[in-house]
Amino acid sequence: MKGKLYIVPTPVGNLEDMSFRAVEVLKNADLILAEDTRTSSVLLEHYGIRKPLQSHHKFNEHQTADRIKDLISEGRNVALVSDAGTPGISDPGFLLARTCASVGIEVQTLPGPTACIPALVSSGLPCDRFCFEGFLPQKKGRQTLLQALAAEPRTMVFYESPRRLVKTLEQFAEVFGEGRPCSVAREISKLHEEHVRGSLAEVLEHFRAEEPKGEIVIVVGGAVVERGEHHNKYRD
């Protein structure tokens, strides 16, 4: 019988955010794939999980996906984890899941931690409809994408590194308008979790004065829709 591929979310901060089921799946897996074995080893040791551990990251996933698929087809149960959060969400996972699903291998994704949802819900911005953009392209296509998103009516969620945060907020203010509502979440579920809310101008001013640190999620309000057209009232 074929084994299964388990996509297992891991805490984005506090190790106690790990679910009981996630721990059980990892304890029973024949092989655990980790984005960074050093990072995942800390989590596994915390929960007393001692299973074979193998690297699976964006630099080797194209080489390893077929081999992992074959192992699962032979009856092995394989669990995939990333450094933090849900694999496949701005982390390796999509290619392996697609490879396995294409040959009829069951792919089970456990519900669990991801940074974008707590940041969105805590932002105070509408979260009934939203679009997740993850990390923006650094160069090619960045400005074109931002111009297209200026008319997006849904709340938008972005990931960003602390060293690029100020520059990104400056670009958002220029394209979306300084008055567009924004919330920046930092270090979600960790000891120094912080949410900075206000207009893009106000949030930008804060982080120009206070150097950002840690994992960053930016939540930006969507453009206002009136009479079937998109209007950015926040420029007024």
Image (tube, helix red, strand yellow):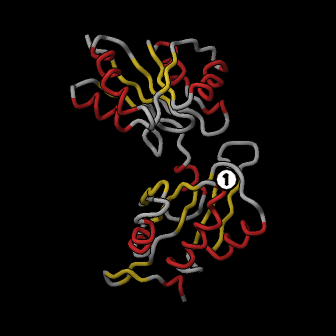
Res. 129 visible in picture:
yes
Classify mark 1: residues with Cα within 10 Å, few (<14), some (14-19) or many (20+).
many
Point 67% across, 53% down: residue: 186
Name of the residue lying farthest toward the bottom? 236
Q: Secondary structure at mark 1?
A: strand
Name of the residue lying farthest toward the right? 209
- From the viewer's perspective, tell me whether residue 25 is left or right of residue 169: left
- From the viewer's perspective, tell me whether residue 157 is left or right of residue 61: right
Name of the residue lying farthest toward the left? 103
Point 29% across, 28% down: residue: 100
Q: Quadrant of the N terminus?
A: top left
Q: Residue 145 in the image: x percent, y percent?
A: 40, 68
Q: Tell me if residue 191 comes above or below residue 74 in the rendering.
A: below
Point 66% across, 55% down: residue: 162
Three-letter code for the amino acid on which mark 1 is drawn: Arg
Q: Quadrant of the C terminus?
A: bottom right
Q: Quadrant of residue 182?
A: bottom right
Point 37% across, 80% down: residue: 230
Q: Tell me if residue 71 comes above or below residue 150 in the rendering.
A: above
Number of labels in the image equals 1
The residue that label 1 is drawn on is 186
Q: Residue 40 in the image: x percent, y percent?
A: 59, 26
Q: Residue 115 in the image: x percent, y percent?
A: 56, 46
Using the image as rendered, state which of residue 69 and residue 221 is in the foreground: 69
Res. 121 visible in picture:
no
Q: Quadrant of residue 108?
A: top left
- From the viewer's perspective, tell me whether residue 105 is left or right of residue 80: left
